[in-house]
Amino acid sequence: MSLVDLVMPKLGESIMEATILKWHKNPGDKIAQDETVLDIATDKVDSEVPSTAEGVIEEILFKENDVVPIGTVIAKIRVGANQSAATIPSTPSAPAAEEYEEARLVEDIPFVPSNTIPAPSSNSSNAPRFYSPLVLNIAQSEGISMSELENIPGTGQDGRVSKKDILAFVANRGKAPVQQQQQSQQVTVLPADNKQQSAEQPKSAAASLPTVYQGNVEIIEMDRMRKLIAKHMVDSKHTSPHVTSFAECDVTNLVLWRDRVKKDFEKREGEKITFTPLFIEAIVKCIKKYPWLSSSVDGDRIIVKKDIGIGMATALPTGNLIVPVIKNADQLNLVGLTKQVNGLANAARTGKLKPDDTIGGTFTLTNVGTFGSIMGTPIINQPQVAIMAVGAIKKRPMVIETAQGDTIGIRHMMYISLSYDHRIIDGALGSTFLNAVSKELENFDSNRQI
């Protein structure tokens, strides 16, 4: 008999921790190789962790909702005497935690707001006490001071404060007697000699009172993904000065071509062709001309990404948003783009996206027209420097210039918008790129063969 360590797998180049959502196995349960042991969640996507060996679950080291660094041992599997554990990599938890902590600090530096709660240097035992980014974010959003955080008893490994611990603290923190709340809200008339002393008292005590909502309201707790989206949006605004430019383009040729070929395309390729791969094709051509739109900022350096990955914002059934990435989009033809778009969209809707499907993006496209909007001002998906939104395609009477004179005709029109990072993308470059995409769409070859 021997024990094999099951470690938290690496789920992407920028992911350094994961939250355990659900254990499918308990100690003593038999497990087959590649059988799902647990479900985990990262800030990118949810995923399943398969077993690396066949045997019996000997021990589970973390509970559900615990945040675990990548590479940490999360369970032990007892395998038979004839099975060698040497082929299964075992990663010590202590070095992994140190490597995780160092990488986490490097990863978070560009995007952490200046008022983020710093990690404490020591606790009562004079040893560093680790707080996960999730716990620190909750503490910051709930106004929990560092002294309060240090006094919260932890139920995690080595006494760490888990998400459940801090949420329980927040829930109990707000339960003050009604009479006490009413008394604290009463206006007290003080003698003249006490007014100055009262005015000098800190205002933080009043700010710590729980918010009271008037009227008929419904309070809904954000789910995990919505909290992450909210944090990413705020971080993006703090990181990049956003500028948005707009353009109007005539996509009549593109619309008529798609209407003509879509049945034959589906019959031949087994895929429905939407407008999204056509938009991505035009974007990729223009990025080739203006490569700074596919870059990122590292301090005073501009990192131009030669491998173009196009993220496409996709709505989930829950109403949340995720951005799967078409990697090496510049190396795919229209058929390849169509299959990638459809495959990633279906995987997102059915919850089958893999962690690798959401990394590697260098530019993002979002289709606000899907929901009826004619234009939008999207927020940049960090660490990218630009994102394009396409609006709904509408028929409108337009002036058509011909050699014989101007006429009025019904045309398929669409607004497109580009939000870009003004640190490196000036208005001239942003508008030039946007106009280039518009011209690509307007000059679409209506006689193109599939």
Image (cartoon, rainbow, N blue to C red):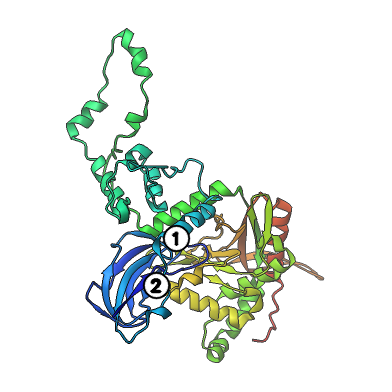
* Residue at (38, 46) in percent of width and height: 127
Q: To which residue does mark 1 refer?
A: 95
Q: Could you tell me which secondary element the residue under label 1 belongs to?
A: helix
Identify the mark at residue 186; answer none if there is no mark. Answer: none
Q: To which residue does mark 2 refer?
A: 351
Quarter of the picture containing the C terminus is bottom right
* Residue 41, image x, y percentages: 39, 65
Q: Does the image show residue 24? A: yes
* Residue 197, image x, y percentages: 35, 15
Label 2 crowd (10 A; few <14 / some 14-19 / many >=20): some
**Given the image, on which type of amino acid does mark 1 rest?**
Pro
Label 1 crowd (10 A; few <14 / some 14-19 / many >=20): few
* Residue at (45, 76) in percent of width and height: 346
* Residue at (33, 77) in percent of width and height: 36
Q: Is residue 33 above or below residue 365?
A: below
Q: Is residue 76 above or below residue 241?
A: below
* Residue 359, image x, y percentages: 53, 67
Q: Residue furthest right?
A: 403
* Residue at (65, 78) in percent of width and height: 331
State left or right for residue 387 relative to residue 146.
right
Q: Could you tell me which secondary element the residue under label 2 belongs to?
A: loop
**Given the image, on which type of amino acid does mark 2 rest?**
Gly
State left or right for residue 92 relative to residue 330.
left
Quarter of the picture containing the N terminus is bottom left
* Residue 439, image x, y percentages: 71, 67
Mark 2 or mark 1, which is nearer the start of the sequence?
Answer: 1
Q: Does the image show residue 245? A: no
Identify which residue, 43 or 135, lies in the foreground: 135
